[in-house]
Image (tube, coloured by chain):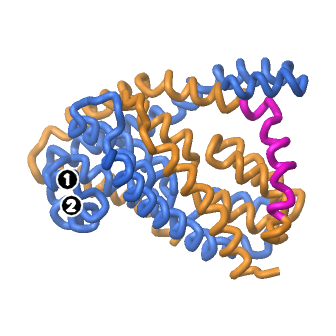
Chain colours: A orange, B blue
Amino acid sequence: MESVSLFATPFLVLVIITSGLLAGQPVYEQFVEGAMEGLHICVRILPYVLGMMVAIALFRSSGALDSLSLILRPVCAFFHIPPEVLPLAMMRPLSGSGALAITADIINTEGPDSYAGLLASVMQGSTDTTMYILAVYFGSVGVKKFRYAVTVGLSADLVSFIAAAFACNMFFGS
Amino acid sequence: MAAGIIFAAISGRTEALNTALFASAENSPKLILELCGMICLWTGLMKVAEKSGLVAWVGKLLGPVVRLIFPDVPRDNPAFFAILMNMSANLLGIGNAATPFGLKAMEHLQKLNNNSAAASPAMITFLALNTAGITLMPSLVIGLRVAAGSQAPTAIIGPTILASCIGTVFALVFDRLMRLIYYRR
């Protein structure tokens, strides 16, 4: 699997360029034209990403997450979920780098092969940073009304976490 | 944002709040700048693929799969190819390539949406798929585990695939449900 990932990208680049050459297209001119569009996308998403990042940073530093995980501790104990992973579950949809930092911390302090370390690894890998993706993708096309996208994204995250706890219990059952 | 500020004021953490405010504002352009090269590279290649007819060909080949998930995207639309490439890149764990394809897909979906300021159902389905983050190769986490001296760094691949599959299936089903509720009103 790892080697597939390594080869996939260069191979894809080769296929795309060859297809352009075979079709007799001005490949370089088209590439530059497309890359210029990419630059416009970057400029367009900046304000959206900035707004979202500042809001999330404020929420994080306020300590609201710590208080929330204190409240949820008994629920965790009931489902045999180590309480160390609670802050991770709450950070994961909000901030990719923040969640990665927590995962690294759990892996290093509890040990990568401890139950908490395994569960944190699975939680980190099995879902993506919902709020960031929504901000970037919707921001790039100027969509301001997200409608039910946040509801769907965050509910799916919650289900992913429960599924992660379930899967870990099944594979590494304590 | 307001909730964070009020909470910090109550718990007396205003100093941390100041630091966070400026650091995050400063870091956002850095993040975009890091992404920018990758985005330009792939949007450039996408343009080549589109003009060469590769897009139309792949769309014809793998159309039925994407059609099932996105019934309201026309088969010959370039959004088709971008969605497909985004999904493949996510599956293979090439996150760097997934984002530019995803942004391109959104651009075409927005054209189908008549440039409205409100999200179209197809967009929400597409983002549900992305935020659920289905992957076969969580390479970043494996890297972390190797660095921490794990005995079995890849032991998490099985449960990770299982959990992300459950999450993705739920996201797609729940999205359809919400779509029904939303448009019945």
Q: Amino acid at mark 2?
A: Val
Is residue A24 in the magenta section?
Answer: no
Residue A2 in the figure: left or right of residue B176: right
Quarter of the rendering containing residue B64: bottom left
Based on the displayed image, in which of its 4 quarters is residue A34 positioned? top left
Q: How many marks?
A: 2
Depicted A70 relative to depicted A125: above or below: above
- Between A96 and B68, which is closer to the camera in this rendering? B68
Q: Which residue is mark 2?
A: B58
Q: Dot 2 falls on which chain?
A: B
Alpha carbons under labels 2 and 1: distance apart: 5 Å
Q: Chain of mark 1?
A: B
Quarter of the picture holding the N terminus of chain B = top right
| Callouts 2 and 1 in the same chain | yes
- Of residues B182 and B153, which is closer to you in this image? B182
Which residue: 52% across, 47% down?
Answer: A151
Q: Is residue A156 among what the camera can see? A: yes
Q: Which residues are magenta?
A: A59-76
- Is disc 1 placed on a helix, strand or loop? helix
Identify the residue shown where x is 71% and y is 74%. Answer: A168
Residue B56: x percent and y percent? 15, 55
Regarding residue A28, the answer to whether it shows in the image is no
Q: Looking at the picture, tell me which residue is in the foreground, B181 or B179.
A: B181
Q: Mark 1 highlights which residue?
A: B55
Residue A72 part of the magenta-drawn span: yes
Q: Quadrant of the C terminus of chain B?
A: top left
Q: Three-letter amino acid code at disc 1?
A: Val
